[in-house]
Image: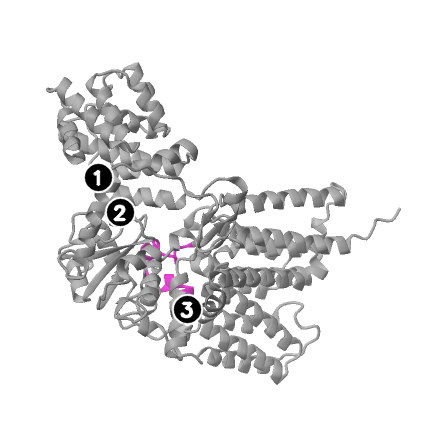
Amino acid sequence: MTEPDLSTTDRRLRRLFLLIVTASFVLTPIAAPDVWWQLSRGQTVLAELAVPGPILAAGNPTAEADWLGGFPFFMSWLIAGFSGLMLLKFCGVFLLLYLLMRRFEPQLQWAAFALALVTLLAANAAWQPTPRLWDCWLLFLTWIATVRWSQSPTKQNAVLVLISLVVWANLAPLSLLGIAVVAIVPWLTGIQTEPTVTRKQAGPLVAASAFALMLTPRGWFTLSDSLTQLLPGLFYARDLLATTVWQPTFAQGLTVESAGLGILTLVTVCYLIFYSTGWLESFAFLIFAVPAWLNADAVPPCAIGIALLLGRSLVAHPYPIQLLKTKDLLSPALGRLLLGLGLLLLSGKAAAGTLPGQSQRLGWGLAPELDITLLNQAIGPLEYEGTAHCMDITSAGMLCWIKADHKVRPYLTHRQALKQGRLFDELSLNAELSDGWMLQKPRMNGGWGGWWVRLKDRNCQLLLVSNGQARTIRALFDSRWQPMSVDAAVIPYGWSGEQLSTPQIIKLLPVKEFLNRKQWTYSLPDPSGTPDCADWWGMLTGSPNLKPALLQARTFRAMQLYTAALRVLHPLLQHYDSPEVRREFELCQKELAYQEQLDTGAPSQLRLQACLQTSPTDAIPLAQAGPGIKGDHSPPEKVSETLARAINEYIHGDCSEAIAALTADDSESLYAKAQIQLESGDPANAASTFRQLIEQHPQDRLVVPSQNMLDALQ
């Protein structure tokens, strides 16, 4: 009996599977930190017809070679808004992976699909509207053009190679990889069906390729700029890069990208060890693999290069493909069923945002943490002139978009600083702001640190910190920099006493008082998303996206608005408990316990027991609030049964049950009841309970914090 021909069915299945998996990974809200920066670059190119870098930044940055990188994204946004960007990224990613699979599909069949799938994982960071997407596309096109020239070395084919390189150099930063492609691809096994290219022909093309990359506003410095961004470890210490996007890939731990790159690396290395017939394939692999291993920012285009090399090698040496035949173990129908189930499981986890490094859920639009509306309301009407220090590319991009007149500009972005050898200056200034290092002090390297003088020398008028950067927000709490918003995606800080910022700072004071002391309760986010971000996964499952709420709670805690932070956390603990939510709750309890220890000599039983039950260890070190709770490590005084039951309900977010359980009138129970009432949004009853504690237990140590809270509530 002959086996039925399943080639047509398999071909359709591969395309369907690729479409489903690509949609689950790519049809997620736009979450690239630099999306506003790229849109601002494109807007500047269209408006000024000039290189955008020196116009957008005030720190004398050099002209960038990839000056057109943001222009296609801005035009897509101009035509169709963020829906245009979503369509651009989905179509761009699916078409790229489809062409990659189709290139090797006739010979490799399901192995070609597996190659496209692993490439999707490894290059996951590039599936956003950023120039890294252009890096991936143009490496692929340069490879195709070089293969075509290798098989028919005509002038027309050579011109196609050079055009792709010129476009690459002006659109994306890692164009130096193009020279490697042109130099190596013609000599790979199986590229030339018969000897058609000589070294005398290839040499001039490589030289012309280097010249083509220089046809940018940066000139011959394009090559050095690209090398710096491809292998920054050659120019900067590893410790300095460890906190940036240029850190080693596997230092990030297990993520979608590192898993995909690890699989690509393992399969390619095994193939080269057991089946390679020459050294050139190994050399080509290292050309792409070493930058990918050492620089997380270079993984996507390097993953495309490794995938093309592996596919080409598998076609040239088809013996290993025989190992993939499993007819003796599984029937074709059962194999396809198991593969489909596995892909559905992977797609489901990607759509739910539960894969490591894939936090965005299935949806459409702009991620809430990149919403520019509230920042625009805070600083849009203020006519600043000077510079702004932006802690990251997100805040720099938002500022450039809001202040399109360029009267106030970011000083430098980290990528601009990287290319100019000034990365240490920018990162050290960030560290000084986050560590509260205000006054000028000598560094161990002989320089001077301290943010006060450095920001004044730059005529800094604004400080922008992304929501959720608790360490920096806490360090600025007692400084002259004060927030002008508490819930914007990027928190703007103005200099207190300065004419433009001071009214906005004062205007925010009653808002903070309301959030921390008045009657309000936090409502969980709408599962369907926001007007700018449709949450499809939330619509399907009814579960809201909790990331914005968690960032907001972290910001409230950093601003010492502990009651506001706990009001956000309680419904999360009750309905959507997670390690991240519990960790934030634990930090709030520890910092409040430390404050009580300063006031009374020991924390209340509410805070102490909440700390002990949520902390993984018996020690209670305090994060960002001071030293740990110290003592003789003796067992805590016995907790009453009703108080213990109430605290158990409290740490699970059920404040109403916790209050109902607190029927005793001892000082600890009354204090716990008043605090929980306040955190549940009932300041009137909280004040009444604090007053009852003071009247019934006038000599108790908890009278002092109770009186302080009562004064604040009146």
**What distance separates the C-alpha of mark 1 from that of mark 3?**
43 Å
Q: Which callout, 2 or 3, points to the residue nearer the camera?
A: 2
Element carrying mark 1? loop
Give the vertical position of 603 relative to 438 (above or below): above
Q: Earlier in the sequence, mark 1 or mark 3?
A: 3
Crowding near the residue tagged with mark 2, few <14, some 14–19, many ≥20 C-alpha atoms within 10 Å = some
Is residue 286 visible to us here? no
Residue 273's spot in the image, x, y percent?
Answer: 60, 55
Q: Position of residue 464 (x, y in %)?
A: 27, 57
Indicate the secondary structure of the residue bearing disc 3: helix
> How far apart are the two marked residues, 2 and 3, measured between alpha carbons?
33 Å
Query: What's the residue type where badge 3 is placed?
Result: Leu
For the point 66% across and 57% down, the residue is 112
* Mark identifier at residue 471: 2
Corner quadrant of residue 440: bottom left
Q: Marks 1 and 2, Cα distance to the nearest angstrom?
A: 10 Å
Task: In the rendered structure, find residue 575 and report the number of the disc placed on it.
Answer: none
> Residue 601: percent from the left, percent from the top?
14, 27
Disc 3 target residue: 227
Q: Residue at x 20, y 52 (%)?
A: 507
Which segment is the magenta one?
Answer: 229-248
Give, as a three-letter code, the residue at label 1.
Ala
Q: Is residue 243 magenta?
A: yes
Residue 326 screen position, x and y as percent = 73, 45
Residue 335 in the image: above or below residue 401: above
Indicate yes or no whether the magenta region holds residue 260.
no
